[in-house]
Amino acid sequence: MKTTRNTKTTKSSPLPAAHTDLGKPEVVWTRRHLLGLEELSGEELEHIFRTAESFQEISTRSIKKVPALRGRVVVNLFFEDSTRTRMSFTLAAQRLSADVLDFSAGKSSVTKGETLRDTVRNIEAMGVDTFIIRHSAAGAPHYITRCTDCNVINAGDGQHEHPTQGLIDIFTIRERKGRIAGLKVVIVGDIAHSRVARSNFWGLKRLGAEVTLVGPTTLVPRAFEKMGAKTSYDLDAALKDADVVNMLRIQHERISSQVFPSREEYVRLFGLTQERLRGTKPDLLIMHPGPINRGVELSSEVADGPNSSILRQVSNGLAIRMAVLFLLNQASGKN
Amino acid sequence: MKTTRNTKTTKSSPLPAAHTDLGKPEVVWTRRHLLGLEELSGEELEHIFRTAESFQEISTRSIKKVPALRGRVVVNLFFEDSTRTRMSFTLAAQRLSADVLDFSAGKSSVTKGETLRDTVRNIEAMGVDTFIIRHSAAGAPHYITRCTDCNVINAGDGQHEHPTQGLIDIFTIRERKGRIAGLKVVIVGDIAHSRVARSNFWGLKRLGAEVTLVGPTTLVPRAFEKMGAKTSYDLDAALKDADVVNMLRIQHERISSQVFPSREEYVRLFGLTQERLRGTKPDLLIMHPGPINRGVELSSEVADGPNSSILRQVSNGLAIRMAVLFLLNQASGKN
Amino acid sequence: MKTTRNTKTTKSSPLPAAHTDLGKPEVVWTRRHLLGLEELSGEELEHIFRTAESFQEISTRSIKKVPALRGRVVVNLFFEDSTRTRMSFTLAAQRLSADVLDFSAGKSSVTKGETLRDTVRNIEAMGVDTFIIRHSAAGAPHYITRCTDCNVINAGDGQHEHPTQGLIDIFTIRERKGRIAGLKVVIVGDIAHSRVARSNFWGLKRLGAEVTLVGPTTLVPRAFEKMGAKTSYDLDAALKDADVVNMLRIQHERISSQVFPSREEYVRLFGLTQERLRGTKPDLLIMHPGPINRGVELSSEVADGPNSSILRQVSNGLAIRMAVLFLLNQASGKN
């Protein structure tokens, strides 16, 4: 891999001087696992972003492949279904020339009563390198790091974190706005149950953004204020001077629950429409981690409008996941 | 890829002079999608066949791989199950060194209420090159071409077309008979609901064959006559001077429907048995797109007999699908 | 592939002189199928083991790939689910650079009424090289060898054999003990229904081990005695001078059946606990083909203890399956 610094970033760098003068980037990254953004330093976040920049170009080539992880094996260990996230990780791994294997929990020896520890250690014994884990239990990926010497990537654990989605979102903001520090970022939706909100919050806070969490009173815990976020139940007020708004996906199963307003009520209070955008900054960046419910979180006009970065987030997902796979494997000292 | 013309074809070419003197084959193919055979010219059909000929040999090698599409990504987007068609496309893509990703609609964000357009655009944003689409709605692949810049291959849309199966069948006739023009081809079965019949009909007609559609009165629409086909309800009469007979698969769900005769009645009237073959040409070519219902469309004796090209159709399927994948990707101007 | 002999083996070779002095190893292996261990000679077993030794090292590299089967296609034709065995074969094939295709019977044309013969011949016609078959009917893989020219590997057929698991177990004993001949091997569990027991028995017997089959009276057929095994219903007596004990997995569905004792009763009589190990040889090798039911076949203490080779069996599974895939493909004369 070329480690030349992205010149655009270097020239008009929006980053603190400390970040642009790292000197020896290879010492920045020593982690073998990516479990959450809460524990990452600003330098580590920046290192991922710069690595992702160097991978961005590969996805635009006709030959979308580099041999960086040739002969490595990446295992998708998804205990919750997620076609899209699995596809993104699979494509990222293939683009680095790794072999990818899906382990779908439903059909597996897990249903034969095997423990998670035994499942992981058995797959490890087959000679694999990286586990990508999605699990309904917060902390499952952390537990797995204690069972295995392989790299572990958290692809969503309960309501805890979804760090690659957080990285994708922050990387897209950084790309569009040229910086993170000082930006006003509004995250809207079911904050209480959202691992995407948590990962965004930790990363944005670390890099100096001001984060406001917005949603129904039942779904925006005040506990986030102690961690440094603002909270609000009034989207229009929060959007007034916002630079970025990230509209979280509303889970269908949530809509029918007690803590949730009716669908119509939610759209009226928290749906992003062209009308609602009138009072906002003209360059307000509009994000959504996908898949979107058109007419719920955003109107189609907004989703497909010029301020939307929804598809760019998906594209950046490849670069971010390639960067993470690359850095973790490199840190294992086998590169 | 070598673009030398297949010498066998050139020498004893059964094709009109215009086809054998194309001069610059690279200008013949400009399409980025394969949606149906109805819209293809004779030159285009011939160009696919010649390209397929050059790929045929690869499947017989021990190293069944050429680097033509290395680093390209092919996505199977199957909204209807079809193990066999999916395997054939997957093997064809792998043989061209492409990466292949399955998107199974059942488990996906489609079930989370995402629109087809959003599904396609999101996968496209991950940096893929070709969509292979099977869908129960006629026209779904056409719609998708308007959502994406990727290549689109129709792998069966409702009762509209299944163009690669049509190409396989015509290519196999061409291989066995040395020509298409002037041949008498009989297609037997549930014509009304068959996308395979439609694709065969359009391609055969374009290349100058005489097509007779045979089946129960309820399942052979007279509308085909206006398009240039003959129709008949008498298989023995139709087979009398036929050069080729293509026995369509009878869907089990159809047999129990009102418009269908009993299974015994169907076999008696339209099943191909050794006895029925007595009055036919000794070199009658017997085809079936598979999977066959032994004892229904054909007796085992006929299916496994010397005139049957059933397994050859399967083999040719690889060459045709490699050719189509190659040509569409080439037309995208990224080769 | 390098055919240099593993030096460790050469130096302190535990094998009969005939085996260490084969001279021309290439004449030893001529089989195109692996259906069971019953039919393999001692020379053939040894040849697989030596080939596996040469592949063992590959799984420890960071680039876990050799080009031995590049461009070959391996098809997993699993009519019974088995995530773990399928993963192991898939990784082994990928490590040899083969392409791998899964054919899951549930979703396929099998359910459309196609015969097994037609399914196999159709897939073969697509240009594949090796079928890996798991089927609930004993003899299904044998039948398939009569339908196809491809290599066939039995990955478990009814209660007949599971030859690669037998090879893995015997290879692991050979690795730990330095020999097979003269060893006392105890196999414990539901012998009557176990294809793993049968494959182990045939291979161990051929190489000169003394095999004792232990389990509930209803599940240890006396018929094995005629084939040269000892049988016993007393685990403690059998373990007294044993060198190896292989604890078979108890199927959950079996536990609720009439012929099976209660779970508690089974654990008391046949579960391997630290306490039960007291009277045994200190270097007793403890094996299990996985996945284990902790607290049933073995206590966690025993499963994770120093005498356990459970994870080593999994690792050796890759080397054995690579060796089998390599040898069968080589015997097809296409290498």
Image (cartoon, coloured by chain):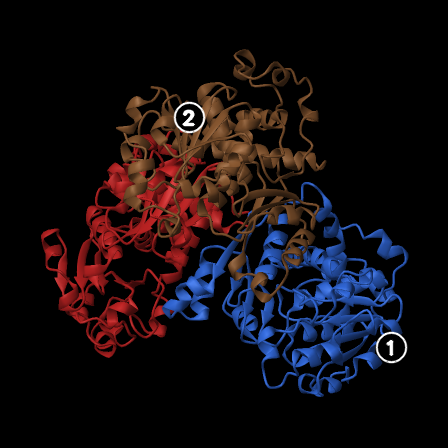
Chain colours: A blue, B brown, C red
Residue C99 is situated, as x and y percent measured from the top left of the image, at 49, 42
Q: Nearer the viewer, residue A125 or B23?
A: B23
Q: Chain of mark 2?
A: B
- Secondary-structure class at tag 2: strand
Q: Chain of mark 1?
A: A
Q: Is residue C306 above or below residue A315?
A: below
- Secondary-structure class at tag 1: loop
Nearest to the eye among marks 2 and 1: give it.
2
Q: Which residue is mark 2?
A: B244
Task: Check the picture and name the quadrant holding the C terminus of chain B.
Answer: top right
Residue B160 placement, left or right of C146? right
For residue A163, what is the image quadrant?
bottom right
Hey, what amino acid is under mark 1?
Lys
Tell me the number on the disc at residue A23: none
Residue C94 is situated, as x and y percent measured from the top left of the image, at 48, 45
Q: Residue at x 87, y 63 (%)?
A: A14
